Image: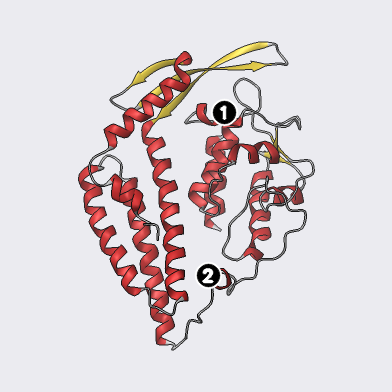
Amino acid sequence: MKNPLYYFENLLSADLSEEKKNIFFSDNEQNWNYNITKVDRENGIIEQELKFYDKYEDIWHLDTGISSFKDSFKNEIDREYKEAIKLLSQQILEISSKSISPEMFITQIKNKTLNFKRKSEQYYSAYPFVKEALIKIDEYLTEYSIDTEIIKSANITIPNISIEDREQVNYATPAITNYSSLSFKWDLINPNDVESELSRLYGLLTANPPLIQCDRQDFINGFSQREVVAGINWKVMAKSKTCSKGSLIYLLLQLIEKCDLMDEPDDFNKKVEYVFRDHLGERLSNIKQSKSQMSDNPAQKERIDEIIESFLQA
């Protein structure tokens, strides 16, 4: 059985922040050495000269991209936190499927997280998101313990069924028509809520001045593993008067991070290129490069933050 807290055990065995920072600089300098303009090792910042070609004006535009070790480290922690929750969920279900109470296992993990939280304050006080991730893991386990107590008090017997069958007990996943693995998957507990949630997000993104232009059904398809017809036109423009791919990537990463409704897929770049189009309806390309060079303050950032906030509040 894989240790769900393996990453955090290794991370909190010592202060590895400087080691990770050195890897961050090494990777960036190796990949982007030709256009790095400033390296601030003390604060973990790399500035890069970015060039954008405007095919309509036939000129090159210059911009500055900033890469931050702190942001990179936070993204790593977020990914590992989600992986830990996924493994914990699978292992608790596996234990329960054998008609064994998971309480002892949950207690052991909670004791570990308590110790890890103390170490995070000792080793990573400059990176509070490490402790925040551990708190979220502890809260997840606490909620699961409460659910278990409710089941016990109601004298409900957990049937001895497979993990695959158990995952279907609450909600039967409807069959997907026009399935496409290239579209995003909006991961809600109840699959029947997907369309209503996506319709609400579509309304926020198309409100004047709209950030996207597309058919509502195509938008829903793009986030529910269905084929898209015309795609989603991204209307936000960069300073170079070209489609701001950085803003689009920022929106998607914010949805993944803050709404916690879908995990970042391994083929993120391919999915973006399949689902989205530029403001002229042309397919997007070079998403991997745009993602690695994106600014901390992309075009329409404040508007995107407002949309995410409104979506979370409803």
Q: Residue furthest front?
A: 1
Viewer-nearest residue: 304 or 160? 160
Judge left or right: residue 169 versus residue 108: right
On residue 290, which mark appears? 1
Does the rendering let one see residue 299? no
SS at mark 2 in the image: helix
Residue 159 in picture, x, y percent from top left: 51, 82
Q: Is residue 146 above or below residue 75?
A: below
* For marks 1 and 2 on the same chain, the one whose residue lies earlier in the sequence: 2
Picture residue at 75% right of the left edge, 48% below the top: 227
Q: Which residue is drawn at 38% across and 77% down?
A: 101
Q: Residue furthest right?
A: 229
Circle 1 packing at 10 Å, graded few (<14), some (14-19), many (20+), is some
Residue 167 falls left or right of residue 10:
right
**Residue assigned mark 2:** 163
> Does residue 193 appear anywhere in the picture?
yes
In the image, taking residue 284 as reference, residue 36 lies left or right, namely left
Task: Determine whether 268 is above or below 112 in the image.
Answer: above
